[in-house]
Amino acid sequence: MTEDEKMAIEKQLDHDFVQDLADFFKVFGDATRIRILRLLLEKERNVGSIAEELDMTQSAVSHQLRTLRQNNLVRYHKEGKTVYYALDDDHVRTVLEQGITHIWHKRGYADILGE
């Protein structure tokens, strides 16, 4: 492989990586998905409990969970007929917690509560 070919491959990989990263952050651009992820920060939950907590239909929650699952932000497991969802891994937890902390401080929410 020539140096030019190697550089072309590296350039394409960088482009693909940046696109994947943009797609990852795009998923965080929906308030409903953020609300679901915040619930899952606490503990794993089933669709019914998420729907009840967020005052949404189970269908609407399932739609958002499908998007989160397809983007590897949540995982699921079944216990009998019940499906439980959780954050996929600690990377997702860290990104979400850092985003929450950033907004909490930069937008003054900490000041409002005297923290």
Image: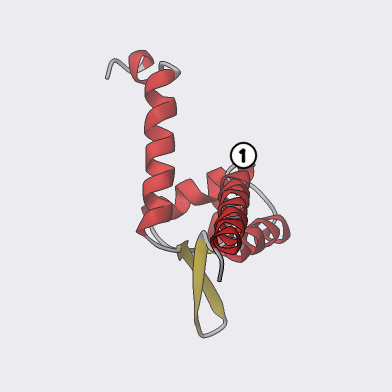
Answer whether residue 109 is visible to the viewer in this image.
Answer: no
Amino acid found under the numbered disc labelled 1: Ala
Answer whether residue 19 is visible to the viewer in this image.
Answer: yes
According to the image, what is the colour scheme of the structure? secondary structure
Q: Is residue 22 left or right of residue 88?
A: right
Q: Nearer the viewer, residue 20 or 113?
A: 20
Compared with residue 65, is residue 56 higher up or lower down, i.e. above or below? above
What crowding class fits label 1: few (fewer than 14 Cα within 10 Å), some (14-19), or many (20 or more)? few
Q: Residue at x 50, y 50 (%)?
A: 37
Q: Residue 39: x, y in percent?
A: 46, 50
Residue reaching furthest to the left: 115
Secondary structure beneath dot 1 equals helix
Q: Residue 58: x, y in percent?
A: 67, 60
Q: Residue at x 55, y 62 (%)?
A: 6
Q: How many marks?
A: 1
Q: Residue 109: x, y in percent?
A: 41, 20
Q: Which residue is mark 1?
A: 31
Q: Nearer the viewer, residue 70 or 41?
A: 70
Q: Quadrant of residue 99?
A: top left
Compared with residue 101, is residue 74 higher up or lower down, i.e. above or below? below
Q: Residue at x 55, y 71 (%)?
A: 1
Q: Residue at x 27, y 19 (%)?
A: 115
Residue reaching furthest to the front: 2
Residue reaching furthest to the bottom: 80
Q: Residue 93: x, y in percent?
A: 39, 51
